[in-house]
Image (spheres, rainbow, N blue to C red):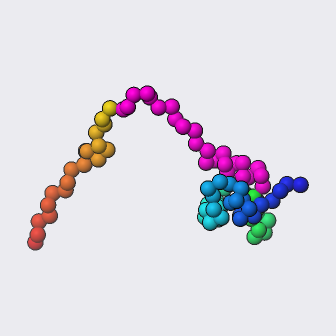
């Protein structure tokens, strides 16, 4: 039989995850719901872990050159005239 975990048990299993975080993001996370009871299986926890897994990108060995500021194209608005 498949092991069913509550919010508290699932949060304890996933490193760095709290019960509150699970509850706030439940609509985006794989889970099983029977009536009003929400539980997580081991497969659900593996899928949650995979959803938020990030691999480092391969960076160039040299430092990137200076780039223009992303907001350099913005200019201030003209002053308002008082009536």
User: For residue 83, which quarter of the picture?
Assistant: bottom left
36 on left or right of 78? right
Residue 28 seen in the figure: no
Residue 43 drawn at (x, y percent): 76, 50
| Figure quadrant of the N terminus | bottom right
Quadrant hosting residue 36: bottom right
Query: Residue placed at 36% from the left, 32% from the top?
Result: 64
Please give the name of the residue rendered at 74% of the width and 62% of the height, measured from the top-left corner: 9
Residue pictured at 68% horizontal, 54% vertical: 14
Q: Is residue 33 above or below residue 72?
A: below
Q: Quadrant of residue 41?
A: bottom right
Depth order, front residue of 17/69? 17
**Residue 46 in the image: x percent, y percent?**
72, 48
Q: Position of residue 80 (x, y in %)?
A: 14, 64
Q: What's drawn in magenta, residue-wise?
A: 41-64
Q: Residue at x 43, y 27 (%)?
A: 61
In the image, taking residue 17 as reference, residue 3 lies left or right, namely: right
């Amino acid at each position: 039989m498949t092991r069913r975990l509550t919010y508290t048990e699932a949060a304890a299993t996933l490193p760095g995850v709290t019960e509150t975080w699970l509850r706030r993001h439940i609509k985006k996370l794989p889970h099983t719901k029977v009536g009003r009871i929400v539980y997580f299986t081991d497969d659900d926890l593996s899928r949650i872990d995979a959803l938020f897994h990030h691999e480092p990108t391969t960076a160039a060995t040299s430092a990137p050159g200076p780039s223009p500021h992303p907001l350099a194209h913005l200019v201030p608005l003209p002053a308002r005239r008082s009536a």
